[in-house]
Image (cartoon, grey):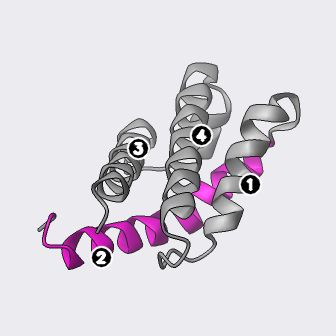
Amino acid sequence: MNPDVVKYLLDIKTSIDSIEDFIGEKKDFTLYQNNKQLRRAVERELEIIGEALNRILKIDATIEIENSRRIVDLRNWVIHAYDKVDDYIIWGVLVVHLPKLKIEIEKLLKDIDFYN
């Protein structure tokens, strides 16, 4: 696998881990919604995930990450429509879609024998 792709996969993994650290095991939406610093930190990590995936797709469009285009679109929405970011939508991404993405990224890293 292209070394740049590996680097971007690791960047995505790091951002996912950071988000999980930020929101904790309790996953309390009210706490999230009432903490501007937490929301901004999560949004920044989502931007990194989307940008890293966008770069991966430019190198290898065949990479198997479900909803990859939607992830890049989320990044664009958070950056360019910052004033329309909806906490409920972001929260849904965090609790429904992020765990699946984490599994996909870990599998890709494991398949290249980089991550155990």
Count of numbered labels shown in the rendering: 4
- The answer to whether one can see residue 57 in this image is yes
The tag earlier along the polypeptide, 4 or 1, is: 4
Q: Which residue is mark 2?
A: 107
Q: Which residue is mark 4?
A: 47
Q: Mark 1 packing: few (<14 Cα in 10 Å), some, or many (20+)?
A: some
Dominant secondary structure (helix, strand or loop) of the stretch shown in magenta: helix
The tag earlier along the polypeptide, 4 or 3, is: 3
- Three-letter code, disc 3: Ser
- Image coords of residue 110 (percent x, y): 20, 73
Q: Quadrant of the N terminus?
A: bottom left
- Image coords of residue 26 (percent x, y): 43, 50
Depth check: give the residue in front, 56 or 40: 56
Q: Is residue 75 left or right of residue 41?
A: right
Q: Which residue is mark 1?
A: 73
At x 80%, y 38%, the residue is 85
Marks 2 and 1, how far apart at CA: 23 Å
Q: Which residue is mark 3?
A: 15
Marks 2 and 3, how far apart at CA: 16 Å
- Three-letter code, disc 2: Lys
Res 77 quadrant in image = top right
- Three-letter code, disc 1: Asp
The tag earlier along the polypeptide, 2 or 4, is: 4
Marks 1 and 3, how far apart at CA: 17 Å
At x 40%, y 74%, the residue is 104
Q: Is residue 41 left or right of residue 33?
A: left
The magenta segment is 86-114
Res 43 quadrant in image = top right
